[in-house]
Structures are given as C-alpha cells and as structure tokens.
Amino acid sequence: MVILGSGPNRIGQGIEFDYACVQASFALRELGVKSVMVNCNPETVSTDYDTSDKLYFEPLTFNDVLPIIEREKPRGVIVQFGGQTPLKLALALKKAGAPIIGTDPNDIDRAENRKLFNEIIEKLKLKQPEGATATNVDEAVAVAERIGYPVLVRPSYVLGGRAMEIVYDQNGLEFYMKYAVKASPEHPVLVDRFLKSATEIDVDALSDGSDVYVAGIMEHIEEAGIHSGDSSCVLPPHSLPENVVKEIERQTIMLAKELNVIGLMNIQFAVQNGEIYILEVNPRASRTVPFVSKATGLSLARIATKVMLGHKLKDLVSLRGAIAPKQSPELNMGDCHAPSGLAMTKHYSVKTPVFPFNKFPGVDTILGPEMKSTGEVMGIAETFGEAFAKAQEAAGNKLPSHGSIFISIKDTDKEAIIPIAVSLIESGFNVVATRGTKMFLHEHGVPATGINKLLEGPPHIVDALKNKKIQLVINTTAGRPSIGDSYSIRRTALERGVPYFTTIEGAKAAAESVKIVKRNAGAINIKPIQKYNLDY
C-alpha cells in the first residue's frame, strides 16, 4: 500500500496529518501489509527510517507521485490522511490508473465542488449558508448584493483557511477578489453569507460504506468566523442541547452514506438560534483526528485504514468495549450516539491552539478565518472548567487565581460581558475597563475601575500591563480602526506573558475556569491519562 503524506509542515497543514499517516503505516504492519510512504519533510515521524517499509522522500505532486505508483504497483493508494495536498491529486491519479482505495475520488470531488455539493444538500433537505461561486469580481459583487453583507469569501480546494476573509462592503470584496483568485486560479471563489453569533461544531466520523460511526462531536469555544484550527474546542459538547446533538449525528450519518465514504470524514457545522447549517464536508482525515483519538482512546486513523482494506467497521469498533454506547449491548452503527455525550467518556477534553505570535515582532494576535496556529495542546479533566484551564496552561496562557482583569469590548458584546464580569468579581478579581465599557458596567451594577486607552495618555492600559498590574485581558474588537487602536494592548499582553482572550466565548470559558483555579488555590488536579478509563 502506498500512503501519500502531507508534504512540508506549514500553517494549516502539519503534524496532525503526519500522525494519521503514521497510524496508517502501523495499521498496515498489524495486517502484514507492506507500507510505502511518500512524503518530503525531514522533521516528521512519517519519514523516520523505521515507520514504514519503504520511504520515497519526494514532493507531493502528480508528476512525482505517479512514477512511484507505477514502479511499486501497489494494491492500493491511500490519499485521505495527508490533508488537502494528496486529496487534490486523487482524481488525476485515478484517471491515470492508480488504485485509489477508500472514498472514491469522484465522491471526494462531489464534496469539494460547490455545485455538486449544493445538489447533495438539496437532495438531503439540509441547510447551508446561502452563497454561490464566483470566478471574477462582477460575479462576486452580484452574489454579495443578493445574499447581503458581511460575506465569507474563500478559494476552494485550500486548507488552513488560506486567503479566507470576512468582507463587510463592496470595496473590500473587490480588493479581496484580485488577491484570492491568484491564490487558487484553477478553482472558483466561494462567497457565503456569514453567520453572526453562531456556534461552530466539528464532527469526525468513520464509515465503511454501510455503517457510520460518529467518533466525536466537538463544540468550538470561539464563535463561527474564527478558523477551526485556531479555535479551542471541547469534547463532548458542554452547552449544546441534546436535541441539537442528536440532529448533528443524524445529518452526519446521512452525509457519510450519500458520499459513500470509506474511512474518515470531517464535517463542520454552525448552530445559529437552534438552526443547524452545514459549512463544509471533508471526506478525509481532519486535523482533529489526533485529539479525538486521544480523548476517546480509539485510534481513528488505524480503524479507517483497516476499513479501507475491506474490514467491517462494526467488528473493529466492537473490539473496544469502552467505545460502545452503554445503553446498547449490541452496537448499532446507524444509531450510535455515544461519542458525542458523556455515555462514552466521563470526562471533558479541551483542545487549545498554540500560536507563534511571539516569534514575529509586530504581528497582531487577533483571530479570524485564516488559520494562524502552529500546534495544539489538550487538557483533560472531570469538569469543563478544569480541562480548559489545563489546556490554557499547556499553551502558555496560564490563568490567574487573583488580581485585576482588564476588559475592553465591542458594543455587540456588552450584554454578554455582564455575567462574565460578575463571575470574575465573585472569584475575587478586580475589574479594570476603558471608559465606554466601564460606564456600561456601572449602569448594570457591576463595579469597575476606569483606565485610559493608549491614545488617551497616561495612566493607560499599556503601562498597567508593563507594570504587572493586570493579570488577565479580555479585548474584543470589530472593524479595522478599532482593531488598530487596540493592537498595542494585545501585543503588550503577549510580550509580558499576560493571558488574553479576544472573543467573548473564550472569555466566558476563562471565567468558568478561573473559578476552578480559585477553588483549588491555583493548583490543578493531575492524574495519569489511563485513569480516565481509556483503552490504549
């Protein structure tokens, strides 16, 4: 079997996909099948001398990969573990005679091609944000005027949200189109209605063509609009209603069967006012596969590899008793709901991204739809608050147990900040805020001390951060002028090692975690991962 890797590590495509490729190689070894790895990154485990039976250190291009396949004459070629890079080669390799195993490249194209995917959504009577494709500026402007601003624009067939942006007016859209079409000239640009104040959901699932296993439903902590690779997420969901979780499972199973998925699949949903929207479907391993595998004790990539070789998913999963739903002695794959709730795991796992901002002087830490993180960490505990606190500390963002909290937020977040500020005060913190935020808090009975913005002169917030008078920063902004005005706050917090949150959802999770930290007098409970009843 030939396994196509992910190529050089870069933002949006890195070690998570290398993990999946390595697990595939290990699975093949268990089955007595010779593995041939094709990858070109010297810093990854997949290119270690003892990971696979044979390694081709070559670029992941059609002209480089096809001669290897012709030379090795494998039983099959695995393309779904290396991220978007090998996925883009699948259709061309199949046409050239390569024996692609797993999800058929034609079905992969149905998920990636906007027109074909729209037909699937309509057939299954599901919902997605209104939008269309555009190949030039005039088409993009026409779509945006029809669906209304703001719009989310992105090239197709890219990973990591490259060249993805939220655009608020026609001038911004015209400027973007000149840049985005260059980023992906062979594919049209997608223009979608941006869902405001929505909760984003990531789902990883396994399918053998008939049975579907929903391996993990992850609730993003940051709202939709922040790239999934940059958002912290929690498994199982900690705030979604049970009926929404069940419906997400149902839609996942429907999509997996419609796309004839063999192996792994990832779906990104958005939930807005109880309505579920499909954002995108990727018939491949996702960057969350290592996280879900670690959180549940089930090696998704190994199982997927065996499924692609013809093994039945039901038999493979039933070997792991901890994975089966406790309410059902016989595993019914079509109705499996356990991984999304606490029936399978009596603990919470939180994935938090790690950013390289301190390596790049002058870079803003504000998050958006284009991915910026270069890694991730995981916190695991019996409560969401403690798991989040562990993940934040592992990411270098250790939450304080006492001191002062600085708050400066955009107008649309002001109502939501009230319970957060109250919770922090109840935990013993003092609240410091800029003039507008302070006045709003006072009007709602929340005590806060005022402080100047940098442009208002001393005593201002940047000096307070430098003098270690602030222990936590909550700063949300909207619009280029506001983002520019508050840049120095976020940058100083980063340079001084002060934990900061730039979304209201992140601040809410932090307030919940601070309670745990305070209750434990700054200590965090530690125990071996094996104690969480995971079967490794």
Image (spheres, rainbow, N blue to C red):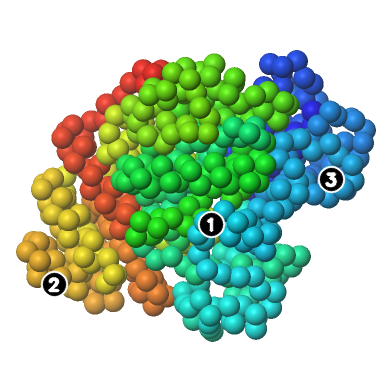
Q: Is residue 469 visible?
A: no
Task: Report crowding for label 1: few under 14, some 14 to 19, many 20 or more residues within 10 A (C-alpha).
Answer: few
Relative to 406, say whether 99 is above or below.
above
Q: Is residue 321 visible?
A: yes
Q: Which label's residue is closer to the chain start, 2 or 3?
A: 3
Secondary structure beneath label 2 = helix
Q: Gap in Å between the C-alphas at discs 2 and 1?
A: 47 Å
- The numbered disc on residue 125 is 1
Query: Looking at the image, do the residues carrying marks 2 and 3 touch, with CB atoms under 8 Å apart?
Result: no
Q: Which label's residue is closer to the chain start, 1 or 3?
A: 3
Residue 241 in the image: x percent, y percent?
A: 32, 46
From the image, tell me which residue sits under label 2: 439
Q: Gap in Å between the C-alphas at discs 2 and 3?
A: 63 Å
| Left or right: 360, with 469 as reference point | right
Q: Amino acid at mark 2?
A: Met
Query: Looking at the image, do the residues carrying marks 1 and 3 touch, with CB atoms under 8 Å apart?
Result: no
Residue 81 in the image: x percent, y percent?
A: 66, 38
Residue 325 in the image: x percent, y percent?
A: 42, 25
From the image, tell me which residue sits under label 3: 93
Select label 1 or label 3 by which is in front. Answer: 1
Task: Report crowding for label 3: few under 14, some 14 to 19, many 20 or more residues within 10 A (C-alpha).
Answer: many
Identify the image quadrant of the N terminus.
Answer: top right
Secondary structure beneath label 3 = helix
Residue 323 in the image: x percent, y percent?
A: 46, 23
**Which residue is more in the foreground, 327 or 528?**
327
Q: Which label's residue is closer to the chain start, 2 or 1?
A: 1
**Residue under the point 72% across and 65% down:** 187
Q: Amino acid at mark 1?
A: Lys
**Residue under the point 53% across and 34% down:** 334
Q: Amino acid at mark 3?
A: Leu
